[in-house]
Amino acid sequence: MTQEQAVDEKRPRAVTWYRTPLDPKVLMGLHERSDLLGWLQTLGYLGLLVLTGSLAFYSTTHWPWWVTVLLVFLHGTCFTFQINAVHELGHGTVFKTKWLNGLFEHVFAFLGWINHRMFDTSHVRHHQFTLHPPDDLEVVLPIKLVLKNFFQQGFVHLMGIKWASTTNFRIARGKFCGDWELKLFPEGDTAKRRPPVNWSRTVLIGHALIIVGSVLAAVFIHPRWLMLPLLTTFAVFCGNWLFFSCNNTQHIGLQDNVPDFRLCCRTFTLNPFVQFLYWHMNYHTEHHMYAAVPCYKLGKLHRLIKYDLPSCPRGIIATWREIAAIQKIQETNPKYQHAAALPSPANL
């Protein structure tokens, strides 16, 4: 093998993706970002977290303990969608004003223990080479999920606390490991590694200050301040059931190494409130097909290209029935991948 061939072997190979044709003027309109709609999505979500957190905090000294438990669980159910907020803001499409995307991406990344410096780098590759290993290792098929995973992660996710803290401690010390991390942040590339290292340090110091501050406030002001870390630092690890049910649908059971987002991404419908919590990522095929379209316009995009998409499950239960049927086949045939039925060209 020549030196040129060796270099070429390491270079990602471009994927020629199929995208449903759209009138250029229509696509231009879909790409337009709005600060107003960005504020409604972002402050609406953040305001919901403040509301549920405030109710849980107030409940500790005014209402029965079981009401407090239920409110903490409700708060966690809403809080666990931090990664979807980070994901959308990281695309830079939520606000027309560029710096607002960066500002709120920092906020939600901190609240969710997410190293957005690493995630953004990984996610660019994920969109370029969706489910084409080794150029995309953010999602690798097959994904195997069982009911036990739902109960382990969907209520109090103790392993999530361990993973988030140990991973951030490792990155804060400049330790990168695994094929994907080392591919994106090579050994010796200090400039590339510095931002994620600094962010992990920020996350650890910031959450430590919240915990220490709440303990001091509990000692000198009122014991109820011990609730503060539960509603901020640890909230993302409580009430994961809805996030688990939504977020794990995106690629599971579908095909890899295909140049068609309709075959490797899954779209399904949700009620407006859960769709809002999920930052509209139930329209996942549309998001991959036209990644520059803001999340709050994906519903419109879906309606425009629905004729060219596979049938769309209605709701979470129907979606997981479809996934369960695929996984049942994979139990006896691990190489099986679901090939979604595409509309016939004659019907378009």
Image (tube, rainbow, N blue to C red):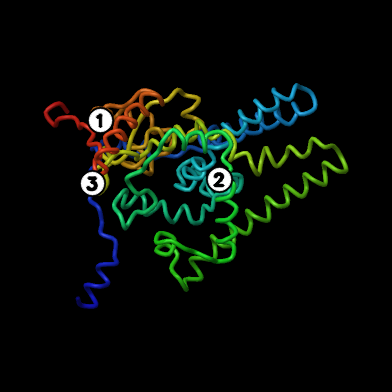
Amino acid type, residue under disc 2 in the picture: Gly
Amino acid type, residue under disc 1 in the picture: Pro
Which residue: 41% across, 26% down?
316
From this view, report whether residue 185 is shown above or below residue 41: below
Residue 43: give x, y in percent of width and height.
59, 35
Point out the residue furthest to the bottom here.
3
Residue nearer the viewer, 76 or 30: 76
Amino acid type, residue under disc 3 in the picture: Val
Q: Earlier in the sequence, mark 1 or mark 3?
A: 3
Q: CA distance from mark 1 to mark 3?
A: 15 Å
Q: How many marks?
A: 3
Which residue: 34% across, 40% down?
251
Residue nearer the viewer, 163 or 108: 163
The label number, if any, that marks residue 135 in the structure image: none
The label number, if any, that marks residue 258 in the structure image: 3
Residue located beneath label 1 in the image: 310
Quadrant for the C terminus, please: top left
**Is 27 positioned to the left or the right of 156 in the image?**
left
Residue 174: give x, y in percent of width and height.
55, 66
